[in-house]
Image (cartoon, helix red, strand yellow):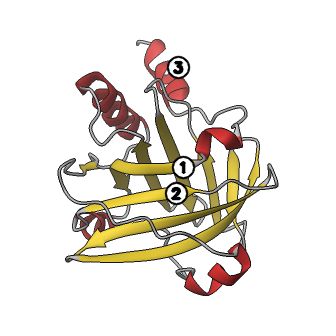
Amino acid sequence: MNQSAPLACEELVRPLDQLDPLYLEGKWALVAGSLSHLPYLEKFKQRDSATVNFFKNTSETNIFYTRSIFLGNKCQYSSYNISLEGSSFTFDGTDKSNLTANFVHKSCHGCMLMHMNVESGKRQHFYLFSRRRELEQKEMEEFRTQMECLNMPPPAVMDPIKELCPEKRASVPAAQTEEKTKGQKD
């Protein structure tokens, strides 16, 4: 029995020890993602593109970002406040026992991995974002291996030539809470 495989998986899906909030600032394009709940994964595959845009914050623990999804020739925007602790984060206003989330170790330069466990692991979401729209084959292979380590379906990969939504400049974060999407955070 090969003992190195579990250790390799453990390293591949290890949460970051600490995340520099400055690293997050700016726009990130969704490159690929997977959801363990197949109906949500099918819905996820319908989007043409998606981005997250993290804004400069005055706090190192409270971070504001907007999400855009290009679906059916329309852009959908939502805004979130998250509380950061190390590499773990919670969405403000959500039941912390219902959702755990963290940023995951990655070897891909200019990439960001978000892993979310919903309802004590009943549902997982794993997203790969990058400053680049298209990644090298070895970077995508690592992401696919991470999906296998988490026993998740193969990822849906975004088409890098599909249009991104134009940036929607956020105003005061407190005023954006009305745009929050209740429930699923896909």
Q: Amino acid at mark 2?
A: Asn
Give the position of the C terminus as an image quadrant. bottom left
CA separation, marks 2 and 1? 5 Å
Please determine whether, in this image, residue 27 is positioned above or below residue 4: below
At numbered mark 3, what does the secondary structure look like: helix, strand or loop? helix
- Give the side of residue 165 with respect to residue 126, left or right: left
Q: Mark 3 vs mark 2: which is more N-terminal?
A: 3
Q: Nearer the viewer, mark 1 or mark 3?
A: 1
Q: Residues within 10 Å of mark 2 (few under 14, many from 20)?
A: many
Instruction: Tell whether label 1 touches label 2 (CB within 8 Å).
Output: yes
Q: Which residue is mark 2?
A: 53
At numbered mark 1, what does the secondary structure look like: helix, strand or loop? strand
Q: Mark 1 vs mark 3: which is more N-terminal?
A: 3
CA separation, marks 1 and 3? 33 Å
Q: Which residue is mark 3?
A: 7
Q: Residues within 10 Å of mark 3 (few under 14, many from 20)?
A: few
Q: Which residue is mark 1?
A: 26
In front of the other: 99 or 57: 57
**Residue 35, percent from left and from top:** 38, 57
Q: Mark 2 vs mark 1: which is more N-terminal?
A: 1
